[in-house]
Image (cartoon, grey):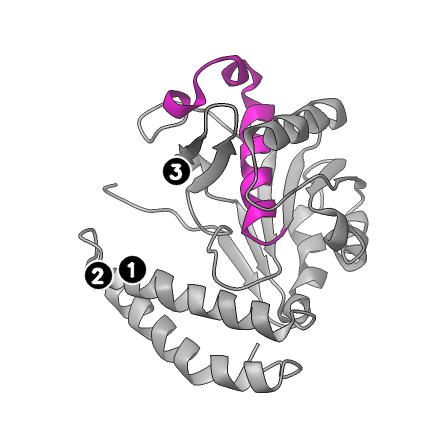
Amino acid sequence: MPYFLSPKVIYGKGALKRLSAELEGKGKCAAVITDRILKEKCAELVESIKGAGYEVKIWDGVEADPTLDIALAASRFLLESNPQWVIGFGGGSAIDTAKAAWVLYERPDLASGDLTKAILPKVKLNLRQKARFVAVPTTSGTGADVTWVAVLTDRAMNRKIVFAHNDIVPDLSVLDTNLTLALPKDLTASTGLDVIAHAVDGYTSRQQNDFSDGPCLQAVKMAMDWLPVVCRDGSSLMAR
């Protein structure tokens, strides 16, 4: 790609409380896409959205390694709810499911075609006619909250489907340190290693450039410095 996009990022302890001001006056209904476990942990997110004057609807059918069928089910929920904001809450699976559902909510005509060819960089998607997209990650590592890609599994055809388009980059990413405090040690370690893997991948990529090298190297340094600390003390907000 000759250019890249990045969402607006709100980060730090208590970042969720600042979401309300970002949404205020930009709609009346918001839909949260998450899984059954995290549904019980999204009270603060819902409170912040309602504080901006929204009705909040929640779909909790996300599964690990999201499938096309799951994304289609989530898109049908969005078509019934008619939200002005779609919010993915959780790890990479939740955010990828929410991204795909949002695309199919905006463009339901694509659902009946070959999705392996429909959502590519040079296709005109014209998203954001109905809603905008917020990613609220609860783990480190996936980068789904800032990327232009979503990956699904088509079990019927035994293949992966990749949505890749600049329009899919979220409008807003909310990185609230508090959301990671409940992560167990093994998940903290594995998602932290995912951070390092992504940074090394970016640094060694044939598409790397002088601008991207700096963030990649800094990400490796920070992960190497702080991942051992947070694995020893998961309650450390500084390490998180």
Residue at the (67%, 39%) spot, across then down: 26
Q: Is residue 113 above or below residue 56?
A: above
Q: Position of residue 9 (x, y in %)?
A: 52, 58
Q: Earlier in the sequence, mark 1 or mark 3?
A: 3
Q: Nearer the viewer, mark 3 or mark 2?
A: 2
Mark 1 and mark 3 in contact? Answer it, CB < 8 Å: no
47 falls in the magenta region: no
Residue carrying label 2? 204
Residue carrying label 1? 201
Residue 34 lies left or right of residue 223; in this view the side is: right
Q: Position of residue 22 (x, y in %)?
A: 64, 51
Residue at the (68%, 47%) spot, across then down: 23
Spatial CA distance of label 1 from label 3 is: 20 Å
Q: Residues within 10 Å of mark 1 (few under 14, many from 20)?
A: few
Q: Position of residue 134 (x, y in %)?
A: 59, 46
Q: Residues within 10 Å of mark 2 (few under 14, many from 20)?
A: few
Spatial CA distance of label 1 from label 2 is: 5 Å
Q: Nearer the viewer, residue 25 or 166?
A: 166
Mark 1 and mark 2 in contact? Answer it, CB < 8 Å: yes
The amino acid pointed to by label 2 is Thr
Q: Position of residue 126 (x, y in %)?
A: 46, 24
Residue carrying label 3? 166
The amino acid pointed to by label 1 is Asp
Residue 18 lies left or right of residue 93; in this view the side is: right
Residue at the (68%, 42%) spot, across then down: 33
Q: Earlier in the sequence, mark 3 or mark 2?
A: 3
Spatial CA distance of label 3 from label 2 is: 22 Å
Mark 1 lies on a secondary structure that is helix
The amino acid pointed to by label 3 is Asn
Q: Which segment did they paint magenta?
A: 90-118
Mark 2 lies on a secondary structure that is helix
